[in-house]
Image (cartoon, rainbow, N blue to C red):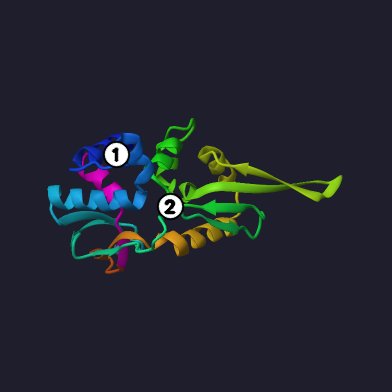
Amino acid sequence: MLDLINKTIYDCLDSREAPFDTADGFMKNLTLADREALIYALIVSSYGEEQDFNVTCTACSKNFTEKASLTQNVDIKLYEGKESLLKKKVDVVLPVSKYTVQLQMPTLWDEYVFANSRGVSPDVLRKADDYLVVKQLNIPSVDPKKPEEVKVLAITNIFEIYSYMRNMSPRDRKTIYSAWKENFGEYGLKIVIGTVCPHCGNRSDMYISMINELFRLSQ
Ligand SMILES: [Zn+2]
């Protein structure tokens, strides 16, 4: 399904200048945030700006539908730095494990490699944003016989990173998430709609993911 979405977006591009002139170049140079923006444009132009959203109330757990406009609830923040965001890397030392993680802006390629690793279920992939932001994991190891020598095991395979992160303490994961948000997370497009539950009156804000919307609308 992801492959199909990526291909559909690629086919929709009018002009394909380098590095977007090949499917591989496209995947390696388009971030997940860019794809959200392209899907947003695709959804608004093909399904209209008014959409019915399925909401599960956070207070009473009942379901209802909320009609909302995509264009009135979108917040777009463009990156204006000189350095390419794709080249930006940020190192963070984790408080519990003492591992160092190198954070990145994930591309479609990172997602593709992860999605095609053995043992990655659609359910894991849906939560993959957490794993994909980690480019490299450095694990220090000390030989008890030579305590002055600290060796570092560098892990770059996204599926191996995932295996380590699954067992990380919540505090370490929270540190990764906050650091990523601070350095990369503000760029892109955010759609948040205000909802009112007709069953209990609870008001809540719901974050809309464009890729999930596309899955839903194209079913
Ligand atoms: Zn409710």
Disc marking residue 101: none
**Sequence-wise first label, 1 or 2:** 1
Circles 1 and 2, Cβ within 8 Å, touching? The answer is no
Give the quadrant of the N terminus.
top left
Residue drawn at the location 59% of the way across and 47% of the way down: 137
Q: Which residue is under mark 1?
A: 6
Disc marking residue 105: 2
Q: Quadrant of residue 96?
A: bottom right
Q: Is residue 150 left or right of residue 43?
A: right
Residue drawn at the location 58% of the way across and 58% of the way down: 92
Q: Residues within 10 Å of mark 1 (few under 14, many from 20)?
A: some
Rendered location of residue 165, percent (x, y): 56, 47
Instruction: Please tell me which residue lies in front, 61 or 139.
Output: 139
Give the magenta range: 204-219
Q: Is residue 132 left or right of residue 140?
A: left
Give the quadrant of the C terminus.
top left
Residue drawn at the location 22% of the way across and 55% of the way down: 53
Amino acid under label 2? Met
Instruction: Please tell me which residue lies in front, 45 or 209.
Output: 45
Q: CA distance from mark 1 to mark 2?
A: 17 Å
Amino acid under label 1? Asn
